[in-house]
Amino acid sequence: MTNPAIRAIKQIYSTLYGQEAKVADYVLRHPDIAAKMTVTELAERSHVSEATVMRFSKKAGFKGFYHLKISLARQSVLKQTITDDPNLSTVVRDLFKEKVADLGWTQQVIDISVLQETLNQLKKSQMVYLFAAGNTNNLAAYASYLFNQLGVKAISTPLPEAQLNLAYQMRPTDFCLLLSDSGGTKLILDIAEICNQNRIPMVALTSQDKSPLTQLARRVLLGVHRAPSALEIAASTRLPLIAILDLLVTLLAQTTADIMFSMVQNVKEI
């Protein structure tokens, strides 16, 4: 059965301009590879601009490149995880194996110097602002809650308009954490631009090392998910980013405990 995305591209192929056709040609030749790419990576491989990739995606009937990716991935991944091996226990084993591998890759690529800078900023900033979009908003709310429990003032909101308002309220004494799995969400890119313009310290948490966000953010903590699991079709696999947030919270909690222990010891000595 032909993938719906492939079918849609073939149907509109004759209406594409030269640059758009380059994107179509690459996707038609390498649908499985294209399904794992960011808009930046596909643009580079097709030798076109990111705007051309987005325009091509909309011409094919999708809201944007992200939705095209989901359609490209759906059939091949479902076939891998279910059709080829209908044994549920095997599917569960393979999915967990992929997630463990993702955490292993994330541990290998994490930048310790950026991690340390992030911890320092979290401890000294007057307010920590967390920004995300779509289903990554849940991670921002999760981290905000835990930071506040540790005594680190943090704020997040899922509403795009409210996020922009918060972004303009930030001061250089604050700290910004930008969460974007794709690294290409316009809202997050706009906020990154605001941070740069107003000299707000920021760190980006993303799963794509080549993305518009990593070009804007000097400091990046990378969460890797390379395995094409069925969960990624629904864009619900955020385990590597969650692991990084948990790492930050754990290290902050340890620091807080050390400070409290030191204070108790000083009181006893007095």
Image (tube, rainbow, N blue to C red):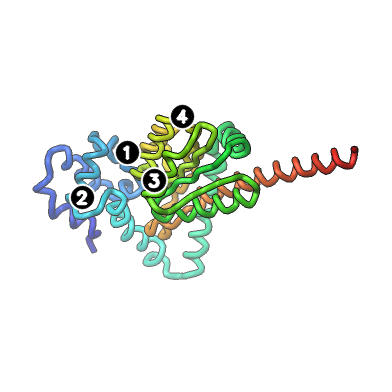
Of the residues shown, which amino acid type is indicated by label 3? Ser
Q: Earlier in the sequence, mark 4 or mark 2?
A: 2
- In the rendered structure, which amino acid carries the disc numbered 1? Thr
**Residue that label 1 marks:** 40
First in sequence, mark 3 or 1: give its number. 1
Q: Nearer the viewer, residue 116 or 72?
A: 116
Q: Which residue is mark 2?
A: 58
Label 2: state its secondary structure. Answer: helix
Circle 3 sits on which residue?
182
Towards the viewer: 47 or 150: 150
Element marked by disc 1? helix
Label 2 CA crowd tier, 10 Å (few <14, some 14–19, many 20+) = some
Q: Which residue type does callout 4 highlight?
A: Arg
Residue 105 rendering spot, x and y as whole percentages: 52, 44
Q: In the picture provided, is 28 more to the left or to the right than 183?
A: left
Quadrant of the rendering where the N terminus is positioned: bottom left
Residue 100 position in % (x across, y down): 55, 53
Q: CA distance from mark 2 to mark 1?
A: 16 Å
- Picture quarter containing residue 266? top right
Q: Is residue 154 left or right of residue 165?
A: right
Q: Earlier in the sequence, mark 3 or mark 2?
A: 2
Residue for point 33% across, 46% down: 33
Q: Which tag, 2 or 1, sits closer to the chain's start?
A: 1
